Each structure stands twice: as C-alpha cells, then as structure tokens.
Image (cartoon, rainbow, N blue to C red):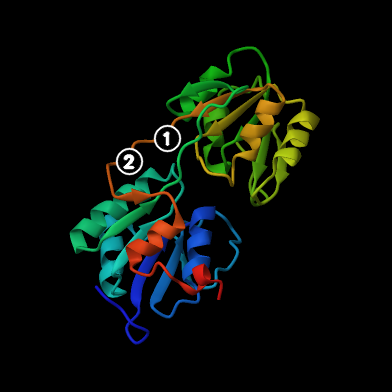
Amino acid sequence: MTSSPATPLRVLILGGTADATRLVQAVANDPRIEAVLSYAGRTENPVPPPIAWRVGGFGGIDGLADYLRAERIARVVDATHPFAAQISAHAMTACTKVGVPLLALERKPWQRAPGDRWIEVDDLAAAARALGPVPRRVFLGIGRMYLETFAAYPQHAYLVRLVDPPRAPLPLPGAEVIVARGPFDRIGDRAMLANFRAEIVVARNAGGGAASAKIEAARDLALPVVMVHRPFIPAREKVETVAEVLRWLGHGDTPAERGV
C-alpha cells in the first residue's frame, strides 16, 4: 500500500517500551504516516505521546482483528516488551486473519559480559526457587505484576521498584518499595543496591539499554543475577532498530531522521 499526505498510511504501534517511544517520535510529524499507539494499560499515568493513543486490551484475537478492520490499519508494528508473549501472539494471529502485515521491533537480549554472575532460568517460578532456602536480600527488577510468585518465599528481604505507587497491599508485605520511572542509570542503580545491601538481583532478560542499569550495577558490585529467559514467541518478521521499521513502512527519510 502506498500513501501520500492526502492518504497517509494507517499504522498501529503496540507499545509500552522505550523502543516504541523512539518509533513514535520518529513518525509523529510525518504527514505520510497516521499512527496510533496502543498501551497495555499496566502503567497508571503513561506519558502522553505526540500521536493518537489508546489504553487497554482489544478483547482477544477477534477484538484486535475487528479493530484493524474498523480503523483501516494497513501495518502493525509490535514494539511491546519482549515478555509480552500473549499480545505478540495475538497480534500475529489477528494480522494473519485480516491480511495486515506485521513487523516486530525486538531488541537483542542481554549477553553475559566479563564479571557477570548469572544464574539462568526459564521462568519466574524457577527464579524464585533459585534464591534458595537461606534468607537473602533480594532486588526484584521484574515489575509489579509478577511479585506473587515470590510470596511463597517470605524468608527473603525484598526490594521492589515500581512505576506507580501501589494502590493495594503487595503480595510481599515486608518488601521495601521504591517508586520511580525509568530509564535508570548505572550509578544510581549501584547506589540503590548498595544502600539496600542487596545480595542478589532477579531480572527478566529484557535486553536493550533502557533497563540495563541494574545488570551493570550488579556486575560492578559482583552480585549474582537470576536471569529469566524470554518466553517463546512464534517466528515472525522482526528488526532491531527504528530505522529498519521506517524503511519497512516505506518512509525511511522521515522528518525526524532529516533533523526537521
């Protein structure tokens, strides 16, 4: 499908990541692209983007397919979190059903670096078990939704960092809570871990630079990291950079890239 300022390309961006934010900024002032950003709704007060946006699910595969038809979406870019496996799978199925091309903007996973002390596991349940029976001081860099998994191991002292203040008691009643919005930096995370006297870090392998500070800080402090592997997502067309997405959209010379 070609487009012009009179008939811009309708694009749905499934977002919630720093990668999605960069993509939104790149297309925001391009009259040839009419993009809509969809947030999952897990953050209470997302920063309003410079394009049209919506919050919440679509109602499963059929709901997303209906949305694509009703909104005349011509392309879908999946820039969701690497652990958002369900929405990614739903997007693939819905796009196939409607005949809309889909591209994933997927950052590379982190790789071990010299000094890393990783304990690699397949899921969060395994991560919780990997902490062991002896009480430890644990930083959970995993987000609010997954804390319940660790409630069965109350012998540990937990530090949790959340984007929004908790509205209800956390499943880890004794946990220390930091409310802060990233991206975070290595120096700050090193100080956070040192002040808490952390003995171990739990993290999901999100990859990219926006969430890497805790991994770098743990390396600096010689702390072990329980690293959770990414969930399975069926094979799909994917790229690693915003520039590659723009080329796929047919607009590799957007005003943002030209410095306009």
Counting from the top left corner in percent of width and height, residue 142 is at 56, 37
Gap between marks 1 and 2 measured at Cα: 9 Å
User: Is residue 154 something one can see in this rendering?
Assistant: yes
Residue pointed to by mark 2: 233
> Do the residues under discs 1 and 2 have CB atoms within 8 angstroms?
yes
Secondary structure, mark 1, is loop
- What residue appears at the point 55 percent right and 76 percent down from the top-left corner? 260
Secondary structure, mark 2, is loop
Task: Say which quadrant the N terminus sits in.
Answer: bottom left
User: Is residue 172 something one can see in this rendering?
Assistant: no
Q: Residues within 10 Å of mark 2 (few under 14, many from 20)?
A: some
Depth check, front residue: 45 or 120: 120
- What residue appears at the point 52 percent right and 19 percent down from the top-left corner? 129
Counting from the top left corner in percent of width and height, residue 165 is at 68, 50
Instruction: Answer with the quarter of the image where residue 230 lies.
Output: top left
For badge 1, the amino acid type reads: Arg
Horizontally, is 169 left or right of 257 in the view?
A: right
- What residue appears at the point 70 percent right and 27 percent down from the top-left corner? 220
Residue 121 numbered tag: none
The answer to whether residue 134 is above or below residue 152 is above
Counting from the top left corner in percent of width and height, residue 203 is at 56, 33
- What residue appears at the point 50 percent right and 54 percent down from the top-left corner? 19
Residue pointed to by mark 1: 230
